[in-house]
Amino acid sequence: MDDKYLNIIILIIGIAFISALILATSPEVEPVEEIDSLNSDQIDGMYNDTPLAFATLNHYFGTTVIQLNQTRPVPELNNPKTEEPEPEVEYDDALFLEIVKDRGESISVIALLCTEAVKGGNRQLLVEQSTKLRSLSQETWDDVEALEVSKHLSAEKRSFQQAMVRMIATASLLTRGLPGSDGERQKMVVDIQGVTDQLTNARLDISKKAFKMQGNHPATGVYQIRVDRTEELNRANGGLDYSQLYPLPDDLIPMGWGFKYMDSRKSNDITISPRYARIHSSYWYEDEGTGNTIHVHAPEGTSFLSVHFRITHSGNRDGRSYTIQTPSLSSFTLHGVGEEFTPLKTPTYTSLGEMYTQKTLNRNELSEGTILFEVPFGMRTADAYITVNLGSVYGKPGWALVNSR
């Protein structure tokens, strides 16, 4: 029993001695420094590890000192760069509208001239005007293509350029000259009118859009781009040189000059000459049966053109046959603006004087009379000439209807 208590006492003394020895020789425990901040990688790792990863642990022989840093640092954000505002785009809307206004009208007028050239059968003028039309249309397309317009006019720009492309293609065909048949010429006229209408519609749309962009109400203000087909047609006609569009023959006899020929028997000399030509809107005559005055007005879109002729029996050659026959009324033909016109039948006497009739003349006699034609309104005497068919020997001499050409 005594040995048992003795062993316990010795064990307790030994444990106390060893503990005292350990305490005496162990280093002094330093206080744990507080963690000021963690970087973003450390923070992410803390969320993935055990909860002890959020603490600073100091172990000393089983003794643990834990001090938590409960403040989660906010990662430093990069300061965003201040973006500079984009510079304003300067659109070419004003220049686009100016081109449409000026060149659009010019192209339309040239196309109208090409139409007249086809109708008149004038190949030289057609090639000249169609070449000008193709060049101006191509130049216009190129200039418009280089422009940057706003979204308000982008669709109108495409429509205008599409009209230019078609105009270039049509003008290229016209430069080849006139087709042979009347049917092909008529088709050519229709093609020109079709592309001209397309251009007109594009110009009208642009005009309306420009007017709206200016903040104007359709019932007020003035359109920046005016499209007037009638005005353009008048401009084309006003600038149209009919002597170029429908050139007169080079061998015409001047007005007032006589042409001498012999009758079919070659017995007598005859001289024929036009004395003057006039334009009229109406004439009148007295009805032989009733005595009433009858007024005759030119139909709408036409005028009357009269030519006064003098025919003289200039002498006999054989001493046997002294009489001659003047040319018949149907022998005369008026030519102008690409058309031919036959004489109208009228009473013998009208407000224009004695009308032309075929007569028999003796030696040294003369006859005068007026021949009347119905012609398109606006046609001038300078735009026409008259011929008379004198048969196979003398052909068809022609006269200009003005005193000087």
Image (cartoon, grey):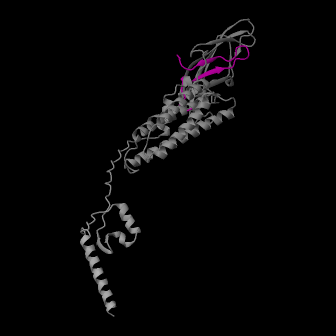
30 drawn magenta: no
Q: Nearer the viewer, residue 1 or 180?
A: 1
Q: Residue at x 43, y 43 (%)?
A: 149
Place of residue 321 in the rendered image (x, y in percent of width and height, measured from the top left): 74, 10
Q: How many marks?
A: 0
**Residue located 69% across and 20% down the image:** 389
Q: Is residue 235 left or right of residue 322?
A: left
Residue 3 image position (x, y, % from top left): 33, 90
Determine the main secondary structure of the stretch shown in magenta: loop
Residue 276 location in percent, x, y? 55, 20
Q: State which region is magenta.
A: 376-405
Residue 231 in sight: no
- For the N terminus, the quadrant is bottom left
Q: Nearer the viewer, residue 296 or 174?
A: 174
Residue lying furthest top:
318
- Residue 287 placed where, x, y %? 60, 34
The residue positioned 37% from the left and 61% from the top of the image is 41
Tell me, yes or no, whether the highlighted magenta stretch contains residue 400.
Answer: yes
Q: Quadrant of residue 364?
A: top right
- 260 versus 382 height, above or below: above
Q: Is residue 164 above or below residue 266?
A: below
Q: Within the image, what quadrant is residue 58 found in?
A: bottom left
| 263, above or below 34, in the image | above
Q: Is residue 157 left or right of residue 75?
A: right
Up-down: is 81 above or below 2?
above
Can residue 372 be seen here? The reply is yes
Is 341 in front, or is 20?
Answer: 20
